[in-house]
Amino acid sequence: MRPTIERRRADLRAAHPTWRARTLDQALRESAQRYGDRPLVLTDERTLSYAETAAWAARLADGLAAAGIQPGDRVGVLMANYLEFVPVKFAIAAAGAVAVPFNYLYRRDELAYVLAQSRCAMLITMTGFAGLDYLDMLDQIAPGWADGPTQALPEMRQVALLPTDGRTRDGVATVASLTELGEAHPGAAAGQAQHQPHDVGDILYTSGTTGSPKGVMVTHDAVLRTAYASALTRAYEDGRRILFSLPCYHMFGYLEGLLSAVFVGGAIIPQTAFDPARYFAGIERHRATDILCVPTMTVALLEHPARNRHDLSSVFGILSGAAPAPIWLWERVRTDLGITEITTGYGMTEAGGAMTLSRPEDPLELHSSTVGAVKMAGAAGLPEHGGALCAYTTVDPMTGEDLPAGSEGELVSLGPTTMLGFWEKPAETEAALTGGWLRSGDLGRVREDGYLELTGRSKELYKSGGELVMPKEIEELLSRHPGVSQAYAVGVPDERWGETGCVWVVREAGAAVTEEEILELCRGKLARFKVPKHVLFLTAEELPTTPTGKVRKFELAHQAAELLKT
């Protein structure tokens, strides 16, 4: 019989009575010593134990060092949830370098920007995935990249390939050859300067409200604290097995999947893309006890006929976050999937991932009407806030002044997992952090019981399928297109996706730009989650504006929502 939630939390607290800051590679080595031959990564093709993962990561780290990677260098990772991602990620940490996991759905121009802005010394990349050809993209972005630094990417000294489609490139390293290089130079990484728990371990790119994506700098200690807090709040049992397809370049898959599992000797069952039938098959084959989803995925699981053809009796936990979900969804999760421990949450990359979670013992109404309370963290949290992971309050979104307790306003947070700042963007960092408090751009309130309610956004970002979308990026693309005078992207409610994109277009005089033309342009230039679902047209005179002529985008969002309801 499974221990009670209270017993599981007590066991976790007993295992971590104090918090000792450590680096990611130290955390892996400690877990390998403790859990040894237990599986850490389970795929249909191969299993990696804790000991095997730690040994492989050490060889790769030596390979990185032998290849010239120095402490503090940035190493880009363009990789879906393949088994290799795990040893690669820990190897970068062991070499003292900074991992920069990129969204592998980026198109060429998006990838070109983040590669240049991050100033990566090395890129570890798939050769192809989901119809995208990364070798061809690199050829277009930086001709001659296989031979070393280029004019476009002067700091990227080398590339290592994961031949996901069987291709390689003459003279270019692979993950396998990098491992062999490490075997030939044992201890190369250990001989380099030591990195510390409060050093930057990851730079994670996230959409901002204006301009281009920003690289969020988070420390080793921050992500480990967040991951431990998830395990404690969700009351992980010893050996929890977590199945997910949410990408590990994102905090969701990385923290709520991979890193949280290591605190209980658990295993992850990563999948490279979401498919309900594969989720069900993976649960049955690997006896998953937990799944990670966003609400759109949860709906797809409930609607798919394959769930009746698989033994799902092992799974009892779900974290379905990143967007609100109605209470009927949670009711069906219980009745149709047999899942008894439901959790939702809220957070942002800049805060260190999800900062709030509803509790698995909460009534369904709380999962639907709130985004949970601040995560429990025990010794890893803030003593002055009862051991919680962070603190939330609200401020006036215009002035930044504190509001009375319980008031609706812009949510701000403070805690040890908050980012150090945006990579090489001091002005944006200063705007986001005020006296250590992080401005979220989200409107909401903190209830008397400590649970958070979200009520809207003070900024223009919207979230589609769990991914933040930056309207300005879409608007700039469309405004350059012949026949388009103005373009305004907004988020509109969507029953399946939570929110989805809608773009209002003002045509140039005499132009006949069509909806399909707009969508085709977006499909060719933007990652799929950024492509708007709806296109609406209006004239310049019909635009809602302020007395000074500024377009009132919140009114466009309201108009779009009303039109699309009918």
Image (spheres, rainbow, N blue to C red):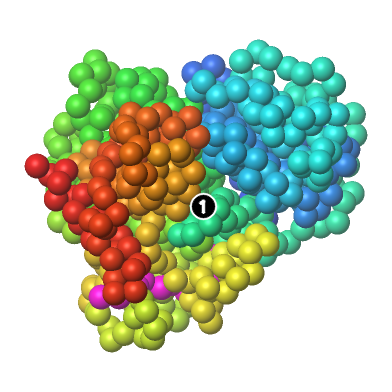
| Residue located 43% across and 43% down the image | 478
Magenta portion: prevailing SS class: strand
Residue 84 occupies which quadrant of the picture? top right
Asked if the stretch drawn in magenta spans residue 551, the answer is no
SS for dot 1: strand
248 vs 476: above or below:
above
Q: Give 492 or 473, whichever is nearer the viewer.
A: 473
Residue 226 point in image, percent of width and height:
49, 58
Could you tell me if residue 232 is visible in this image?
Answer: no
Residue 439 point in image, percent of width and height:
44, 71
| Residue located 25% across and 57% down the image | 541
Q: For the view shown, which residue lies furthest in the top direction?
A: 166
Could you tell me if residue 481 is visible in this image?
Answer: yes
Bounds of the magenta segment: 408-417
Residue 162 point in image, percent of width and height:
67, 24
Identified by mark 1, the residue type is: Thr
What quarter of the picture does the C terminus occupy? Answer: top left
Residue that carries the numbered disc 1 in the rendered image? 206
Residue 61 point in image, percent of width and height:
78, 40
| Residue located 55% across and 52% down the image | 213
Q: Give 308 or 511, whichever is nearer the viewer.
A: 511
483 vs 223: above or below:
above
Q: For the view shown, which residue lies furthest in the front direction?
A: 510
Asked if the stretch drawn in magenta spans residue 412, the answer is yes
